[in-house]
Amino acid sequence: MELDNQANPAHKIHHVVTCCSWLKFTFLAMLFCVLVSPAAAYDPLDPTGNITIKWDVMSWTPDGYVAAVTMNNFQMYRQIANPGWTLGWSWAKKEVIWTMVGAQTTEQGDCSKFKGNTPHCCKKTPTVVDLLPGVPYNQQFSNCCKGGVMASWGQDPSASVSAFQVSVGQGGTSNKTVKLPKNFTLLGPGPGYTCGPAKVVPSTVFLTPDRRRKTQALMTWNVTCTYSQFLASKNPSCCVSFSSFYNDTVVPCPSCACGCRNKKDCIKGDSKLLKKAGINTPRKDNAPLLQCTHHMCPIRVHWHVKQNYKDYWRVKMAITNFNYRLNYTEWTLVAQHPNLNNITQVFSFDYKPLVAYQSINDTASVLLIVFSIF
């Protein structure tokens, strides 16, 4: 991939991993890794980004209610990749899940006290996952059945939604008797998200299919989940190297840029073990299998200055995946540079600018690069 810019590049490179003071431009490159404050789940490049979980009570039942649960990914560049999201919570009373459409719990729990009609789940702390594509029509719900994969809002707003329907029993049959679930957790697909408490909000208004009449939910509550890279991993997940046409020297990623690991945690590129069956199969704990490198990063972003003229400069960016267990079929790169607000031409990818916030030097512009491989 390449991009042109009419302005002369400054030359000081800052990255979440490395800093080279002899250069004079500021560049921040991230592929699924962001520099954030360790004290809170906050991203200065996307300060309002979050995943909002909305519960809409659509009808009452003899012992509870039927709710539509909708998850919206309002993050600008962090999508939920395969194997998708996992949502959990704790019931406030003795609720059970009678049925689900568009999702399922991972465990049924102890339903022995029920005779005849058995609930879908009796656990106090249910764990819910999305259904896979291709399930029968009667098990589908609007925006369901994508294996828990959600695009980021900056990539594709229409694909940044996931939803399912749940029928809750023993949960109260009015706005006064319903108790909101507690202790929400969200994995997507690894750790890093922190969810706040459920809060009652004005009931959602819906349009009928013919768009001629408005209806509204009987009760609505929201849960907001935010992401912290420090919660996800104590080490960065990528690093940046640098080179230019006027110098044969390459500024590499620093040694142990993503943490120093034992030799048993990586594998050489020419190892015979790579031919072993199942060596590339992802693990449930998402543990990587890295190629042995001096930087020990799953991802390396290389920034190469190809041309530097008075009126414009051109850069080529190359992204290398060193994780044998994970394919990045859809990825997003975020780069910060003083001249990215003056791009004249790009190759091989789609892009859009991100708004610079007060927490960032106002001379810097942020570029959101989206590139999907099908």
Image: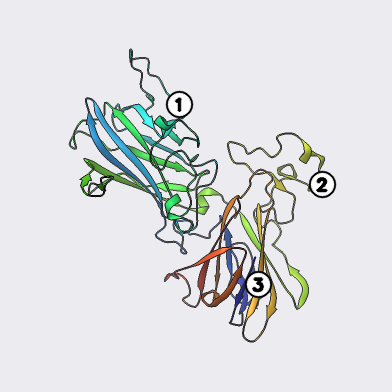
- Please tell me how crowded label 3 is: few (under 14), some (14-19), or many (20+) other residues with Cα within 10 Å: many
Label 3 – label 1 distance at C-alpha: 51 Å
Residue 95 relative to residue 11: left or right: left
333 and 6: which one is in front?
6
Q: Are marks 2 and 1 in contact (CB under 8 Å)?
A: no
Q: Earlier in the sequence, mark 3 or mark 1?
A: 1
Q: Can you tell which of label 3 and label 2 is closer to the viewer?
A: 3
- Residue hosting label 3: 315
The kind of residue tagged 2 is: Asp
- Residue hosting label 1: 107
- Please tell me how crowded label 2 is: few (under 14), some (14-19), or many (20+) other residues with Cα within 10 Å: few
Q: In the image, which disc is placed on residue 270?
A: 2
Colouring rule applied to residues: rainbow
Residue at 70% across / 43% down in the picture? Answer: 265
Label 3 – label 2 distance at C-alpha: 31 Å
User: Dot 1 lies on which element?
Assistant: loop
Q: Which residue is farthest bottom? A: 310
Q: Earlier in the sequence, mark 2 or mark 1?
A: 1
